Amino acid sequence: MSGPMDDRQPGPEVEVFGQKLSMRELRRRTGDTSAVAGIRSVVLDNGVERGVRALEVRTSAGLEFEVLVDRAFDLGSARLAGAPFGWRSGNGFRHPGLHEHNDEGGLSWLRALDGLLVTGGLDHTLFGGTVDGDRYNYPPKSEVTHGLHGRLTAIPARLLEAAEIEVDGRPVFRLKGEVVQATAFGEHLRLTRTIEVDFDGREIRLHDVVDNLGFEPTPHMFLYHLNIGWPFVDQGTEFVAAVSKHLWASDSVDSQGVSYRTLPEPQRGFVEQVFEHELVAGADGRHRVALIAADGSRGIEVAWEAAGMPHFFEWQNLRDGQYAVGLEPSTHHVGGDAAARADGSMIWLEHGDSREYRTSIRVLLGSPETEDARSAIRSLGDQPD
């Protein structure tokens, strides 16, 4: 890996508006390559979003997405050629100062749920509750109380990098941020997130490292709430995965009769459905799932390293006005914090310990790409009806 691309050499070609051009040839045609692809730093300045720093990323393939610096370096709106695929809930990208962590019985996280990626963690995911805190050796804090999916969402990041770099001779946009979740007499965890996308790419690549800066053994739980919305979620959209078995489903599945596999149109008063699927990993050690349109014209494929996040949930929020599917790789089973402590599956990080996570989100265009994705997943295994 090296510095900025050498303008004196033609270098590898990138695709720009259907043409193959070297970066040198592109620069001959424009005084600023950000005319076709680039990173722009902005500050949102209205309503509940006021004061939130964001990075707007555009590629020459028509991919656009936001990195919300002040919301844990998560991903906000996302579009391809103007068509949105990152779900918008109506909440807006609320400033972290407005977050209500302990309100509504710990469910106030739902008021911050918006955008393509909302990350759960760093010491707790899934539903809230009270757990033992004696390990922090602070008598007034014998217990720790958590809300849904933890505290990470409302912590601003420190921006470390936002630049065009060269990787294997090709131009790549890299964004890097650091989020620290800490308290006196408690956890002191750090998330370092690196996001990369090719200059002419349709794939977002995440590399997360979580380490313990503190000196007490600290629980670690981590989850990606990857939220896909219309038109990539629509009537007839198919969830495709290599599912060896279903481990759990919410009670609403029996009463509503909506399949985990093929989606209906939006439903009035739909009660969220959650499934935990046991997936089959590929020879490369990665899990893969996809959402594919009924006519095969478009889709989203998510792939991640199974060793880091061996568990997976499918979240269906098919209610009128909120229509979305969540694809959720997770470090832990759906039972959550207390269950992980009880069965010994909780991850404990000592001082200096770290965990790594690598994930990609790829937009599929046209039947050849969606069929290739389906075939790759089917090569790993089928899925129950």
Image (cartoon, rainbow, N blue to C red):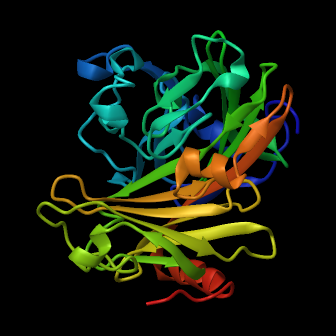
Q: x, y (%) of residue 8?
A: 84, 36
Task: From the viewer's side, name the closer residue of 123 and 223.
Answer: 123
Task: From the viewer's side, name the closer residue of 56 and 70.
Answer: 70
Q: Does residue 244 appear left or right of residue 51 in this picture?
A: right
- Residue under the point 72% across and 48% down: 357
- Residue under the point 49% across and 89% down: 384
- Residue 369 lies in what quarter of the image? bottom right
**Quadrant that contains the C terminus:** bottom left
Q: Does residue 357 appear left or right of residue 294 in this picture?
A: right
- Residue 194 lies in what quarter of the image? top right
Query: Residue placed farthest to the left in the image?
Result: 268
- Residue under the point 73% across and 44% down: 347
Q: x, y (%) of residue 264?
A: 24, 76
Q: x, y (%) of residue 149?
A: 48, 40
Q: Is residue 66 visible?
A: no
**Quadrant that contains the N terminus:** top right
Q: Is residue 85 visible?
A: yes
Q: x, y (%) of residue 301?
A: 54, 66
